[in-house]
Image: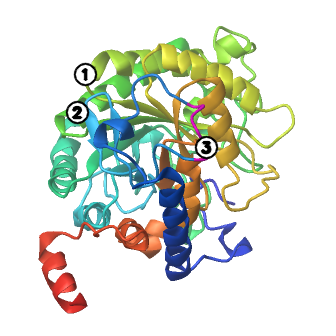
Amino acid sequence: MSQYDENRDGTHENRLPVDETDNAAVALAELRNARDVASGGIAGGSPSENIIHPQCHSRHDREIPEVDLLSPLTIRSINFRNRIAMSPMCMYSSEDGFANDFHLVHLGSRAIGGVALVMVEATAVTAEGRISPADMGIWKDEHIEPLARIARFVAAHGAVPGIQLAHAGRKASCDSPWNGGSSLKTPEEGGWQVLGPSPLPFDAGDPVPKPMSAADIAHCISAWEAAARRALAAGFKVIELHAAHGYLMHEFLSPISNNRTDEYGGSLENRMRLLLATATRLRDVIPQELPLFVRISATDWADGGWDIAQSIVLCQKLKTLGVDLIDVSSGGTTPDAKIPVARGYQIPFAARIRDEAEIRTGGVGLIADPQFADEIITSAKADLVFVGRELLREPYWAIKAQHAVEVEPSWPTQYGYAVRRRAK
């Protein structure tokens, strides 16, 4: 049984061939050359033209795009060197929630590799909010310095350090995926009591979650606030609130997992209440010059569940609260979902939310080659592309994308000297 974030779940991976980067490089170079001819100059324009300002301009000229994959992006005071983000991916490699040398090398490699945003994996705001005992955590002050070490390294190599704050809800207390990922049902197994909006387990045989009381909900919101303060103290410049993939925030949103009859259940307004309250608290804590992202599942892919229409309403409200970008994924609430997995299968949701909620979006989902990533940006379907598994395969994917369009790759000095000398 798989209960994990889709960015780490390899279930669907073998359904599609992996595009070879070298072939994509040729195609992307041809695409960029054609664009230059059409525009009468170099694609991308001046630096000021490449900035997306607070109002999202979703209806721009799709024939001669103003921005592309390698265009910089400014959100509030934070400058991203291109439109490539490392998606948060759980590594299940922490002890008592602490970041360690593995995380420094894992995340730091992608900063050296040229991405604009390095997003730390789902980081638990409470100990019981972990998916597994090996999850990253930020529920105590002692977690700050190991994370700060990572943030400093990422920033020193030109990328923006970001962190995703999460609570697994009823999908907590599981073994690591390479050990089968099954529920840990007893303290002897290393498990703990799971929480949720309602006493509805994720799958048959899973522990029944304890329905959260008003006091539990208040504690949860406070835990998110405290986690955000620790993330800021660690030096992170982007904070993302995880409200996707069937974890706690998504559980409150979806009628599949929420059958409450109080102010947190029933109507759409009530089901959105916890997420909106938490986003409000985080926006109050996060300095105005720093961005706040929210990851959502745009649909449950199941009848009677959360869907794109509700997502658009939610995103409109999140925008009014000061959320800057919606990281658009899908699924995770039910193991019975029928998901039509294919390259870019979630991008249409990002495009709709961008257009209809008029908020920036991030596109995610089997993005493996630079040409496709570039098309997402140039066709105004998203403002960032979040790359997951492909960055596990190739930490220098962003540098290869630069090479593909005949832009001087931004190798770190220690590598670039040798690489350029060899090329001559």
Look at the magenta stretch and give its main secondary structure: loop
Q: Nearer the viewer, mark 2 or mark 3?
A: 3
Amino acid type for the residue under numbered disc 1: Pro
Instruction: Check disc 2: other Cα within 10 Å, few if <14, some if 14-19, many if 20+.
Output: many
Quadrant in which the C terminus appears: bottom left
**Residue 42: image x %, image y %?**
39, 56
Residue indicated by mark 3: 62
Amino acid type for the residue under numbered disc 2: Leu
For the point 55% across and 80% down, which residue is it?
Answer: 23
Image mark for residue 287: 1
Element at label 1? loop
Front-most of residues 262 and 108: 108
Instruction: Check disc 1: other Cα within 10 Å, few if <14, some if 14-19, many if 20+.
Output: few
**Residue 413: image x %, image y %?**
13, 71
For the point 26% across and 55% down, which residue is it?
Answer: 99
In the image, 406: left or right of 178?
left
The image quadrant that residue 255 belongs to is: top right
Q: Tell me whether the residue at label 3 lies in contact with that at label 1, contact meaning CB atoms closer than 8 angstroms.
A: no
| Mark earlier in primary sequence (3, 1) | 3
The alpha-carbon separation of the residues under discs 1 and 2 comes to 9 Å
Is residue 210 placed above or below 351 in the rendered structure?
Answer: above
Residue indicated by mark 2: 232
Q: Tell me whether the residue at label 1 lies in contact with that at label 2, contact meaning CB atoms closer than 8 angstroms.
A: yes
For the point 28% across and 69% down, which residue is it?
Answer: 408
The alpha-carbon separation of the residues under discs 2 and 3 comes to 38 Å
Which stretch is magenta?
58-63
Q: Nearer the viewer, mark 1 or mark 2?
A: 1
Q: Nearer the viewer, mark 3 or mark 1?
A: 3
Element at label 3? loop
For the question of whether residue 293 can be seen, the reply is: yes
Quadrant in which the N terminus appears: bottom right
Residue farthest toward the top in the current orientation of the protein? 263
